[in-house]
Amino acid sequence: MFIEIDEPFVCEHCGNEVKPLGYSCRNHCPKCLYSKHVDKEPGDRAEECKGMLKPIGMENNPKKGYIIIYKCEKCGAIRKNKMAEDDNFDLLLDIVKNN
């Protein structure tokens, strides 16, 4: 079950003020690409961990486009999320190249 939440937030990793995406749910910072481990299912806010999700890689899905792969710095869980139009693609390429 997907719960759509698209609201502004301040990135806990870099302090960037993140604006709503406007066409889908924003769940990560477009500047540093970090996210927060808050959902068990998209939008449910039921995850107790609350650790920072570090971007560690990407995959290219023919239907969805680029997908950012995350690893939780607290519990080690792996999560994935679709890249947004305004995400820092150069940073993502650097992450992929250096991992």
Image (cartoon, helix red, strand yellow):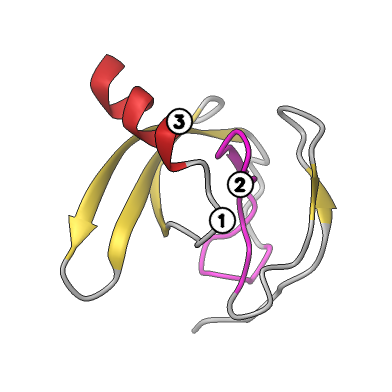
* Residue located 28% across and 28% down the image: 96
Give how far across and how far down residue 71 sits, in percent.
42, 34
Between residue 70 and residue 19, name the one nearer to us.
19
Give how far across and how far down residue 91 sits, in percent.
45, 30
Q: Which residue is mark 1?
A: 86
Tag 2, which secondary structure? Answer: loop
Marks 1/2: CA distance?
6 Å
Q: Which residue is mark 2?
A: 30
- Say whether disc 1 or disc 2 marks the residue closer to the N-terminus: 2
* Residue located 59% across and 59% down the image: 39
Q: Mark 1, residues whose alpha carbon is within 10 Å: few (<14), some, or many (≥20)? A: few
Whether residue 99 can be seen here: no
- Say whether disc 2 or disc 3 marks the residue closer to the N-terminus: 2
Marks 3/1: CA distance?
12 Å
Read off the magenta span.
Answer: 25-45
User: Callout 1, which amino acid?
Assistant: Asp
Check contact, mark 2 vs mark 3: CB within 8 A.
no
User: Callout 3, which amino acid?
Assistant: Leu
Report the residue that reaches farthest toward the top. 98
Give how far across and how far down residue 15 sits, in percent.
82, 32
Q: Which mark is residue 46?
A: none
Relative to 95, say whether 42 is above or below.
below
Q: In front of the other: label 1 or label 2?
A: 1
Q: Which residue is mark 3?
A: 91
Whether residue 17 can be seen here: yes
Q: Is residue 41 magenta?
A: yes
Give how far across and how far down residue 3 sits, in percent.
61, 81
* Residue located 62% across and 57% down the image: 27
Check contact, mark 1 vs mark 2: CB within 8 A.
yes
Quarter occupied by residue 12? top right
